[in-house]
Amino acid sequence: MADNSILTSTTGRTSLADSSIFDCKVTEISKENEFIGSASYVEEEMPQIETRMILVQEAGKQEELIKALKEIKVPFVKMESLEEFEGLDSPEFENVFIVTDFQDSVFNELYKMDYRIVGPPVILNCAQKGEPLPFSCRPLYCTSMMNLVLCFTGFRKKEELVRLVTLVHHMGGVIRKDFNSKVTHLVANCTQGEKFRIAVSLGTPIMKSEWIYKAWERRNEQDFSASVDDFKNEFKVPPFQDCILSFLGFSDEEKNNMEEMTKMQGGNCLPVGDERCTHLVVEENIVKELPFEPSKKLYVVKQEWFWGSIQMDARAGETMYLYEKADTPELKKSVSLLSLNTPNSNRKRRRLKETLAQLSRETDLSPFPPQTPKSCTKSSKNSTPVPSKQSARWQVAKELYQTESNYVNILATIIQLFQVPLEEEGQRGGPILAPEEIKTIFGSIPDIFDVHMKIKDDLEDLIVNWDESKSIGDIFLKYSKDLVKTYPPFVNFFEMSKETIIKCEKQKPRFHAFLKINQAKPECGRQSLVELLIRPVQRLPSVALLLNDLRKHTAEENPDKSTLEKAIGSLKEVMTHINEDKRKTEAQKQIFDVVYEVDGCPANLLSSHRSLVQRVETISLGEHPCDRGEQVTLFLFNDCLEIARKRHKVIGTFRSPPGHTRPPASLKHVHLMPLSQIKKVLDIRETEDCHNAFALLVRPPTERANVLLSFQMTSEELLKENWLKMLCRHVANTICKADAENLIYSADPESFEVNTKDMDSTLSRASRAIKKTSKKVTRAFSFSKTPKRALRRALMTSQSSVEGRSPSSNDKHVMSRLSSTSSLAGIPSPSLISLPSFFERRSHTLSRSTTHLI
C-alpha cells in the first residue's frame, strides 16, 4: 500500500520544482482554453501544479534520501508496485519517480509509460546545491556527464553501442551522430576513420569505452564528474593503440627508448620485416634505402610521426610523415672527386692547391643559417665588404661579428622553437609544462636576446662601414650594464634549469616528444635543449677572448686600444657577478694536470671557464705541426686545442732539487690553438695504406693561407668517428654555429697525399730514431746550449790571461769565437718556434715542392 502518512504538502513551488515543466503546463492550458490575457491572470485561473517525488521500492528505504526531501519540504510518497500508483495519480502533481535500479522490471514499465525517472544521486545533488530538478526526457540516474556531448566511432556491435549510449543518457550526457565542433569527447574503438582524424585536428579528447563503464560504476558518488582530468586521463585512447611498430636506422639506445615509449603509449613492437607490423618508423637521416619492399598495408613513416603522436597525445595522420626514398639523394660533397691519379707530381701539387682552395672558399662563406625567425631578427644589410688588404684586426672583428650573429640566431631558435610553443594557450592535450617550469627553464633568455640583438646590429654597422679607427670597445661598454643585469640570473641558475629539463623529460612523455621533434629540426643542428641553453654560459668568456685577441692586433696609437681594455674589464666585471660555486673543481684540476705534464704550456691555458674535454694520442702524418712520425698528443678543451709532442730526452739534464716528487714533463708544448681557427675537419677514408687518419684545415688570424694538419689516431679506446664528432661539436660551440655536421668533410687519402703505411714499419721507426738522435746530438754539442755561467767564466779567464798586454792574434781569434758563442746563446731552439712563424718559414719552402698551403 502507498505510504500516504508521510506525504508532505507545501504551498507554492518548492526548490525542486522543474521550471521547464511548469512553463510547459502553462502553455498547454492557455492553448486549450484559447484564452488571451496577461500572464498573471492565467496563473490565477490555472490550478497550482507541484512536483511530487515517488520513492519506488528500495528508494523508500534510504534514510539519507528521505531526510533530504524532508529538509527541503518536498512532497513525496512511497510506492512498492505499479498497482499502488493508480490511487496516487492526481492532476495536482507532476510525478517524478525515484528508482535505485535502472534495470529491473518496475523501471522498464515506468520507462514504457514515458514517466519521468531519476536516481537518488540527482535528488541528493540538487538538495545539496539548492538547485532545481534538471529536466530530461530520458531517465536520469546521476549528473556525472551533465553538459558533455559525445560522439562514437569504430563500434561494429550494435548491442555494445546501444548499451553505451543508454549509460551516457542515464548520466546526463548528450549524443551526436555526426562529429562537429560542439562535441566535447569522441569515444573510439579504433584509431582510424574520419571522425578520429577530425578529433585529432581539433584537439578533442579521444576516450575508450571503459571511461563510460567506469563512470557508471561510480554513479552513486556525490559530486563525481566524469570530465575531471584525473579520472578522464586514465581512459584516453593512447597514441599507439592498435599499432605494432618496428624501428629502422636507430642506435640500440634510441631503439630501446622508443620501444619502451611505444609500450607506455599502448602499442607493441616487433622486429623489422615482420608482416604483423602496422608501422615502420625510419631514421630518415641515416636510412637511404629500405632493406625490403614494404606491403601496401604497412605505413613507412619518419620518426617525427612517432614523437608528434606522443606530443599531441593522439595518433598523428601518417600521410604528412611518410618516408619517401630519394632517387638521387643529396649527399655531402666528397673530396674524393678531386683525387689525384696522375703520376705527375707537379699536377698533384696543383690539384692539391685547388682542393684546399675550394675548401677555403667554402670556409669563407657566411655562417648564417638559411632561415631565421622573422619575429626575432631583422634582415641583415649588404654582405660584409672585404678590404683589399685583410688586416689581422679586421679578421678578428669579422669573426666577432659572425659569432655574435650566430649566437643571436641560436637564442632566436631557443625562443621560437621551444619557449613560445610551450607558452601558447590551447595546446592539444593541455599544457605540456606548467608556467613555473617554463620560467625555471628559460629564465632571462628573452632579455639576453634583446641585448645581443642590439650588439649584433651595432657590430654589423661597424663591419659594413669598416675603418681601422672604428671603436669596437665602445659597443660593449655601451651595453655593459645590460649584460650585468641579464646574465647572472640565468647563469647562476643554469644547473637548476638543466635539472628541471631532465626531470620533466623523464616524468612527462609529451615534453620528451616535444624535445625530440625540435631536436631533429635543422635549426637546432641536432642539439638538445640543454646543449643550446649552455651557450649563454659560454658566450661572455668567448667574447672576452676575442676582444683580447682584437686588442693584440690593434696599434698602440689607435684610440680603440684603451677602449678595448675597458671593455674587457667590463666583461670581467660581469663574470665576477656570476656565482663562483658554479665552477667545476674537477675540470680545473684536469687543466692543472695538463700544465704540469706539458713543458712550456702557456699560462693563459688556466681559465675559470675552460674545461678539458678529451685527450687523444696521435702520430703526425705531415710536416705540420711536427715532423712526420712524431708522437703528438692533442688536448681538446671546450674552446681551444693544445698540441704537444713527446718530449725527447735531453743529454746532461740537471737533476731535480731535493724533495721534488713530481715527475718531469713528458710532453713538449707546440701550439695552443683556438678552436675558431679550425675551418674544416677532414675524415680520411679507411684504405689498405691509411688507417685511423684525419686532418684539420686551420687558418691562423695572421696568415692568409690555410694550413693542413694531418694525424693518425693511436688511441684504441676512442673511435675516430666519435672523436671527430666531439671535435666538431666544440668548434661549432666556439663559433656559435648549430650545424656542426657541416664542418666534417669526407676525403680520400690520395687527395691530400696522406698515408700511414710506413708508420709502424721497422725501417721507418729506425729512420725516425736516427733523425731524432741527430737532432739531439746537434743540440748537445751546440754552443747555444752552453750555460751562460760557463761562457762568462771562460771569457773572464781569457781576459785575465791577457791583462797588462795587448792580445795576440791567437787571443783575438779566441775572443771572436767566444763573442759569437755568446750571441748564439740568445737564439731560440727550433722546437720552441711558435706555430705561425713556423708556418711562415715553411710556406716559402713548400711552395716550391710538395706544399699544403694555398
Image (cartoon, rainbow, N blue to C red):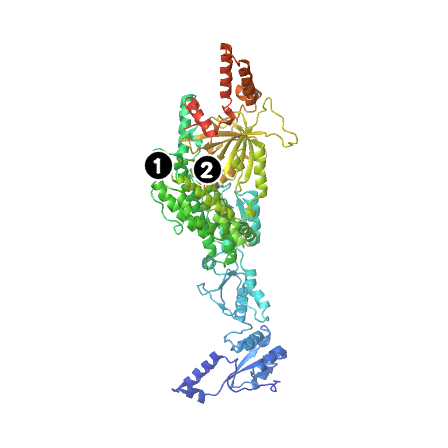
Q: Circle 1 is placed at which residue position?
A: 386
Residue 599 location, x and y as percent?
A: 56, 30
Residue 602 location, x and y as percent?
A: 52, 34
Q: Is 452 drawn above or below residue 130 in the view shown?
A: above
Residue 462 location, x and y as percent?
A: 36, 42
Mark 2 closeness class: few <14, some 14–19, many ≥20 residues within 10 Å: many
The residue at 36%/47% (across/down) is 379
For badge 1, the amino acid type reads: Val
Q: Quadrant of the C terminus?
A: top left
Total count of labels: 2
- Tell me if I can see residue 370 in this picture: no
Of the numbered discs in the image, which one, if any, rests on residue 362? Answer: none
Residue 311 location, x and y as percent?
A: 50, 54
The residue at 62%/31% (across/down) is 663
Kind of element beneath mark 1: loop
For badge 2, the amino acid type reads: Ser
Q: Circle 2 is placed at which residue position?
A: 676
Outermost residue toward the front in this view: 804
